[in-house]
Image (cartoon, rainbow, N blue to C red):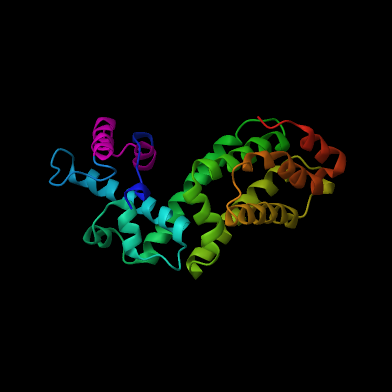
């Protein structure tokens, strides 16, 4: 099970913990973790206790994502999470009430990371198409960079528990609203698109990613970018404009 244990790098810890603690303390924690195969040495006293507690929580969240991706939410147990996080059972229950509570927290943190990435990717560009392309590009990179999080958000949330399903729906609605708002901002007043179009595009992209992830077909997933852009542009601007996106190379 040691090979399945999650490892939190300094960059990951800094991103997760923000500026709540001095970066030197976070760096020291990352170094201790790397020397202990992802687990703090016993009897650690050199770091603030609240920082250690926060890092333990992050490890449990990462352990939940890893266990979910490998086993599936319905089949995994708290013990599966503990083995991947390298954290004790009493520590788990200091942070979470049960498996569902931990899963929902892991979903929320992964969804927040995804939203932040895509919002940053789509900041530049003069038109909605120019902003959408890097956004979709980074969505595909997210699947490659964070496969555990991608599996949790796209695949396992569908069958985990009712609150997870609601969170998944809210995440899709958020992306659909963002796309709809950008397209509307550039559309003539008398030719405003239906909001259903954005919902259909987001749902279609999510369904395609679900299929690929569920079958483990992610090796060349970034090559889907032109096809996704064609699919997104077609209902708004027609075949000719969509074909322009299909012809652009993948970086």
Q: What residue is rendered at 28% in x and 42% in y? A: 37
Majority secondary structure of the magenta segment? helix
Residue 188, relative to residue 197: is it above or below?
above
Q: Is residue 21 left or right of residue 116?
A: left
Residue 203: x, y in percent? 67, 56
Asked if residue 166 shows in the view, the reply is: no
173 or 201, which is in the foreground?
Answer: 201
Total numbered circles: 0
Q: Is residue 197 left or right of residue 84?
A: right
The part of the image, by quadrant, that contains residue 95 is bottom left
Residue at x 80% of width, y 49% of height: 235
From the viewer's perspective, is residue 79 above or below residue 139? below
Q: Picture quarter containing residue 171? A: bottom right
- Magenta region includes residue 13: yes
Nearer to the camera, 219 or 185? 219
Residue 58 lies, in percent from the top left, at 34, 48
- Asked if residue 230 is among those painted magenta in the image, a careful observer would answer no
Determine whether 45 is above or below 169 in the image: above
Quarter the C terminus occupies: top right
Horizontal arrangement in the rendering, residue 145 relative to residue 212 (left or right): left
Q: Nearer the viewer, residue 97 or 84?
A: 84
Q: Is residue 6 visible?
A: yes
Residue 2, percent across and down?
A: 31, 49
Which residue is pictured at 37% across the width and 42% down the height? 16
Q: Position of residue 220 (x, y in %)?
A: 63, 41
First to last magenta residue range: 12-35
Residue at 83%, 48% in the rendered image:
191
Q: Nearer the viewer, residue 192 or 165?
A: 165
């Amino acid at each position: 099970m040691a090979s399945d244990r999650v490892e939190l790098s300094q960059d990951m810890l800094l991103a997760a913990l923000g500026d709540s603690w001095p970066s030197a303390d976070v760096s020291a924690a990352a170094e201790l973790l790397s020397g202990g195969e992802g687990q703090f040495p016993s009897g650690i006293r050199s770091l603030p206790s609240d920082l250690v507690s926060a890092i333990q929580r992050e490890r449990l969240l990462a352990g939940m994502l890893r266990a979910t991706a490998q086993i599936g939410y319905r089949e995994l147990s708290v013990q599966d999470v503990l083995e991947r996080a390298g954290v004790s059972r009493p520590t788990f229950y200091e942070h979470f009430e049960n498996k569902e509570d931990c899963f929902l927290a892991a979903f929320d943190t992964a969804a927040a990371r995804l939203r932040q990435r895509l919002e940053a990717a789509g900041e530049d560009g003069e038109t909605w198409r120019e902003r959408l392309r890097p956004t979709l590009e980074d969505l595909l990179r997210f699947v490659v960079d964070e496969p555990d999080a991608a599996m949790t958000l796209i695949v396992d949330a569908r069958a985990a528990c009712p609150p997870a399903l609601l969170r998944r729906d809210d995440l899709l609605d958020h992306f659909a609203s963002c796309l709809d708002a950008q397209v509307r901002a550039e559309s003539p007043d008398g030719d405003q698109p239906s909001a259903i179009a954005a919902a259909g595009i987001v749902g279609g992209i999510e369904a395609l990613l679900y299929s690929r992830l569920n079958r483990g077909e992610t090796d060349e997933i970034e090559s889907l970018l032109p096809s996704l852009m064609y699919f997104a542009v077609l209902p708004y601007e027609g075949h000719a404009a969509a074909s322009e996106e299909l012809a652009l190379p993948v970086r």
